[in-house]
Amino acid sequence: MSLMTRIRASWKPTPINPPTVDPHLNQLDPITRSAESIRYSILSIEYWVSPNGRVREWLRHNTHLFTWLLFPAILVVPVVTFILWHVMRWTTMLTSIMRHLVLLPILGLLAVVVLILLVGLLRAILR
């Protein structure tokens, strides 16, 4: 079953009923009345944007997708970051070791050349 077929099968937007104001709005205390007016405003905007329920269904699908992607990201990304950090440290150490391994023969060769020159200079002076 393809992904689009599965999405189409689960895509079932239901029409939204128009929002109604609480009939007992005048009897509510001020905090509840303000919460009820905010609820009515949000539901009015939702009904205005999508009375057939497609936006709500789109949000539901994307929330599920976000959830499915969030958990692996939380569990996998720190582990991968930790491994990459150690690989970087090992690479830095190996580069340092290789630099020293290349430098050591060059310094040895330089010491041999200096010794040969000193021996030649001493022979020239003592003759």
Image (tube, rainbow, N blue to C red):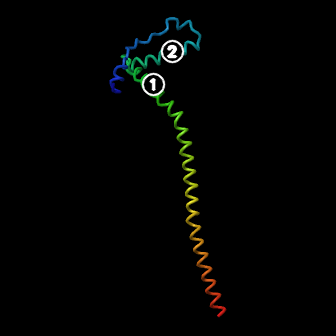
Identify the disc placed on residue 64.
Answer: 1
Distance in Å between CA atoms under marks 1 and 2: 29 Å
- Amino acid type shown at disc 1: His
- For the point 51% across and 15% down, the residue is 37
Q: Which residue is mark 2?
A: 37
Comes first in the chain, label 1 or label 2: 2
In this view, the residue in front, 106 or 33, is: 106
Q: Is residue 37 above or below residue 82?
A: above
In this view, the residue in front, 32 or 78, is: 78
Count residues near mark 1 (Cα–Cα under 10 Å), then give few for <14, some for 14-19, many for 20+: few
- For the point 56% across and 56% down, the residue is 94
- For the point 52% across and 8% down, the residue is 25
When asked about the image quadrant of residue 5, the answer is: top left
Tag 2's secondary structure? Answer: helix
- Report x, y in % for residue 76: 52, 36
The C terminus lies in quadrant = bottom right
Q: Is residue 94 above or below residue 1?
A: below
Tell us which disc is closer to us: 1 or 2.
1
- Report x, y in % for residue 95: 55, 58
Instruction: Find the residue positioned furthest to the bottom.
Output: 127
Is 79 displayed left or right of 11 in the figure? right
- Report x, y in % for residue 51: 37, 16
- Amino acid type shown at disc 2: Ser
Count residues near mark 2 (Cα–Cα under 10 Å), then give few for <14, some for 14-19, many for 20+: some
In this view, the residue in front, 53 or 121, is: 121
When asked about the image quadrant of residue 97, the answer is: bottom right
